Amino acid sequence: MTPLLEFAQTSFSYEDRVVLRKINATISDGECIALLGPNGVGKTTLLRLAAGTLSPQAGEVRLQGQPLRRLKHGTIARSVALVPQDVDVPFAFTVEQFVEQGRTPYLRMFGGLQAADCTAIEDALDLTDTRSLRGRVFNQLSGGERQRVKIALGLAQQPELLLLDEPTQHQDIGRQFEMVDLIRSLKRKGIAILASMHDLTLIEGTFSSVWLLSPEEAMRKGTPEEILQPELLERAFNCPPRCRSALEDQLRGRRELVL
Amino acid sequence: MARAITPVDVTIASDMERRRPSRYRIFVGILIVALVVAIAVSLGVGAVGVPARKLALTLLGRDSLSADQRIICISIRLPRILAAALVGSALSVSGLLFQGLFRNPLADPYVIGSSGGAVLGASVGVFLLPSVTISGFGATALLAFAGAVCSIMLVYALAHVNGRTPVVALLLAGFVVSTMLSYSSYFLEALDHDFGIGLRVLASWLHGTISQPTWGQLAIVSAMLVFGLAGSVPLARRLNTLSLGEEYATHLGINVQQTRVALIVIGSLLTAAAVALGGLISFVGLVVPHTMRMVLGPDHVRLLPVTALAGAVFLLLADTVARTIIAPAELSVGVLTAFIGGPFFLYLLRKTKRELLL
């Protein structure tokens, strides 16, 4: 069966700095993957490659067997939605107007929103529990609300694959759990998810696989149990040896959280 | 993720469709009525007053004006009124487009130097190529357009950093470019040895005076405005998406580069249309879209027609005041818009400080 998305020997570099080297990986329908790795290792770059907003210098990224570079952005955006880390909106758009933008790939040049578009927007607001925010100004939302509204925009694209860039970053612990719950409910809807994560405690029980990017080695893929090992993480994140016990504590913490 | 459409969804969708445009339509209706009233009032007032009753009867087909009054209203005031409405509309819409392009509510054809570029282009036409004319402008309108395109590309290149246009960079680049361009026009003036018509034309351009246009000139500018408005319609929705930033818009299927070029071309066309009749009129392209945005929110699809109408009403009223307030002498409307627009803009700047600090 053709995977939903496939990285085939994908390499990417910014000018002379190589970021990703010969990545091989696939995402199947409905799979829920956490992307781990130290700062600057190329997690956001990998997500951009998956969304087609960056093109690899070597190798390919394929969406249902077709190379992304041969597809139009609008076509890709109907299957893959990228939810970026930061959005900076210069005008006072309401949440509803913001989420409406997710229908852009479906609109004709002169046409307005159709009934199907409105349904998709309502569904997206429902799934992310942001219906009550629809009249609020996006720029005046709290961090947690903003994050959910950005995901609502992605869901309005009706994607098969949702790419989340640090969805729990700068969130308090309550909002982090809310985000994890949201990711689980999207998973139940059958949407595949690739999310870059920093918090190790939030991975097990939510994500079915983990991709670990490290600066020196090839990307590791496995189940959370296989990847969330102190030795592997210590090496990938280049932790000083004295932090070993803190790392183990964090990993133990996530087990207690799951149980 | 397809889901069966439930009756609830349908109700919500149709409810949204029903509820949303109605208040908006009333607002558009009010603006259309305001434009008609403003034209009627403006026809009646001036150095020679024409009673409203007579005007109304004439409009209803029962001509009761004296020969003098008819000449004043139809041959002198009407072209000027139409010119003011066209200029106001063109400036406001180009302001709206530039604000979307720069993702910055402070952009305006005057502030960012596009008007200055148009004046310089038009001056080249008047001083260096005076013989090439069609209906009174010809080369001038074309060169004004070229000047506007060049200056905005220069300001854009200077002020656009990492996908953003910081307020400070935009204002500085716009200030420098527009000052350079205005003084280049003075330089051309100094080269002109026969002190002919060009001097007067340039002086009125730099003050922002709505000239007494010929019907041919009005026809050309109307055509530019209609073309510019038609071209803005498919751009309005893309401007909403472009507000999310370059990368996001690209991801959602917008061809950012192509959209920017289209915005520059159409915004400059509208600026050139305005400059050809009114010269450097400040703040209209800034105050009108901004006020409309405060009333209706930032959706460019809804803002476009409303901005075009409100701009026409605003400048028409301003020009009427400008030509009557010290009658029989006349004030340049640019002086008046600077007086109204400047303080109003400062007030907005204070009130929406958070929104403007990018």
Image: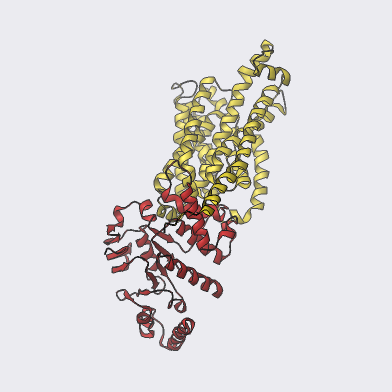
Chain colours: A red, B yellow
Q: Quadrant of the C terminus of chain B?
A: bottom right
The residue that appears at 43% across and 74% down in the rendered structure is A206
Seen from the viewer's position, the closer of residues A244 and B174 is A244
User: Quarter of the image holding residue A65?
Assistant: bottom left
Q: Quadrant of the N terminus of chain B?
A: bottom left
Image location of residue B350, percent across then percent down: 66, 52
Residue B103 vs residue B294, the one in the foreground: B294
Question: Is residue A115 visible in this depiction of the protein?
Answer: yes
In this image, A231 relative to B202: left or right? left
Residue B33, relative to residue B171: is it above or below? above
A29 over B65 or under it: above or below: below
Residue at screen point 42% across, 78% down: A204
In the rendered structure, the answer to whether residue A54 lies left or right of residue B149 reads: left
Task: Report the residue that reaches farthest toward the top.
Answer: B67
Q: Is residue A72 above or below residue B302?
A: below
Count of labels shown? 0
Residue B293 horizontal/vertical position (percent) = 60, 46
Give residue B307's position: percent from left, percent from top: 58, 39
As displayed, is residue A72 above or below residue B145?
below
- Asked whether residue B242 appears in the rendered view, the answer is no
Q: Quadrant of residue B317?
A: top right
Left or right position of B261 against A97: left
Residue A105 image offset from top left, x and y in percent: 41, 50
Camera-side residue of A76 and A36:
A76
Q: Quadrant of residue B303?
A: top right
